[in-house]
Image (cartoon, grey):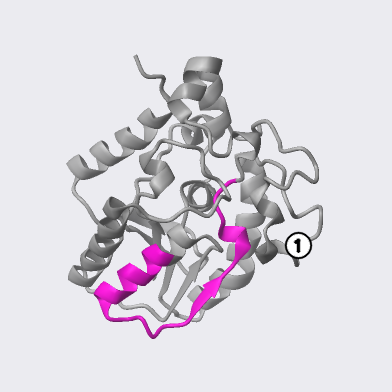
């Protein structure tokens, strides 16, 4: 049996401001820093030790990993950054207030943009300098790899190959892996493990800063999964994520 831990970054400043973030590189809020530290404390209390960590190119995931490893006293382990673990690219919605967008376009439309499987939000225009995918850190990507907007299906199409090529072989060798990433890149992995249908996937919300532990068999099929938190904590945290796309009344 293998164990794999998935950790969504702590609350970011734009999570706090209820904005679509995507590939925009925003920092953690003060609450997010504490969530990241608490994640490390939860993992330490549960006796976890890691051989390697994987994270994205975005600092809210990177610094969440740093804080968690600091609490675990495991800052020395190798860390691999991969753009394929980035959050879903929200296109022209990037930076917009979710509640204001829901008031303008309707909660149903915002739910489609946030949670649907194969519908992408409105894209950036090609060559738009405001597109965060044009940042220097992505200079090695081809035009086809550099998104203008992404659906969850598009996100899965980059996250799962990253897992298969970079993470799965290490798990099979017995390495203990921590993946610190984002709501949608982790939803992509969860969908891959659980083979969720599209209807269930729409309702899947991943809370910030709470480790999710998978137990996997020799073929990396899930035997069980659990958050390192009480049912009440998980219910409150997932409700808060789900409510982000609702208009203010």
> Magenta span covers which residues?
63-88
On-image quarter of the C terminus: top left
Q: Quadrant of residue 64?
A: bottom left
Q: Is residue 48 visible?
A: no
Residue 244 can be seen in this image: yes
- Residue at the disc numbered 1: 141
Q: Is residue 107 left or right of residue 137?
A: left
Residue drawn at x 43%, y 38% as measured from the top left? 204
Residue 234: quadrant of the picture: top left
Q: Secondary structure at mark 1?
A: loop
Q: Is residue 110 covered in magenta? A: no
- Up the image or down, 51 lies above or below 153; here it is below
Q: Nearer the viewer, residue 115 or 167?
A: 115
Quadrant of the snapshot with the N terminus: bottom left
Q: Is residue 224 left or right of residue 200?
A: left
- Please state if 177 lies on the left or on the right of 67 as rendered: right
The picture places residue 172, in percent across and down from the top left corner, at: 51, 75
Task: Assess whether residue 72 is covered by the magenta stretch.
Answer: yes
Residue found at the very far bottom of the displayed protein = 76
Q: Position of residue 203 (x, y in %)?
A: 43, 32
Residue 44 against residue 23 in the figure, above or below: below
Q: Residue at x 54, y 35 (%)?
A: 197
At x 56% / y 50%, what residue is drawn?
24
Of 13 and 111, nearer the camera is 13
Residue lying furthest front in this view? 129
């Amino acid at each position: 049996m293998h164990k794999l831990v998935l950790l969504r970054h702590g609350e970011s400043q734009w999570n706090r401001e209820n904005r679509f973030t995507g590939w925009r590189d925003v920092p953690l809020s003060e609450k997010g820093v504490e969530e990241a530290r608490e994640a490390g404390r939860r993992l330490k209390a549960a006796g976890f030790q890691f051989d390697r960590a994987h994270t994205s190119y975005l600092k809210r995931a990177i610094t969440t990993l740093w804080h968690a490893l600091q609490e675990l006293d495991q800052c020395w382990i190798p860390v691999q950054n991969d753009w394929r673990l980035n959050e879903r690219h929200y296109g022209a919605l990037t930076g917009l207030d979710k509640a204001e967008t829901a008031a303008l376009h309707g909660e149903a439309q915002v739910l489609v943009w946030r949670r649907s499987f194969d519908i992408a939000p409105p894209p950036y225009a090609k060559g738009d300098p405001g597109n965060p995918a044009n940042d220097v850190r992505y200079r090695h990507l081809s035009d086809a790899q550099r998104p203008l907007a992404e659906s969850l299906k598009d996100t899965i199409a980059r996250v799962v190959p990253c897992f298969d090529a970079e993470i799965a072989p290490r798990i099979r060798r017995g390495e203990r892996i921590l993946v610190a990433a984002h709501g949608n890149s982790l939803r992509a992995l969860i969908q891959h493990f659980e083979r969720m249908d599209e209807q269930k996937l729409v309702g899947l919300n991943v809370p910030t800063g709470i480790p999710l532990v998978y137990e996997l068999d020799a073929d990396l099929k899930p035997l069980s999964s659990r958050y390192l938190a009480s049912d009440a904590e998980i219910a409150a945290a997932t409700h808060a994520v789900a409510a982000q796309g609702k208009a203010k009344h």
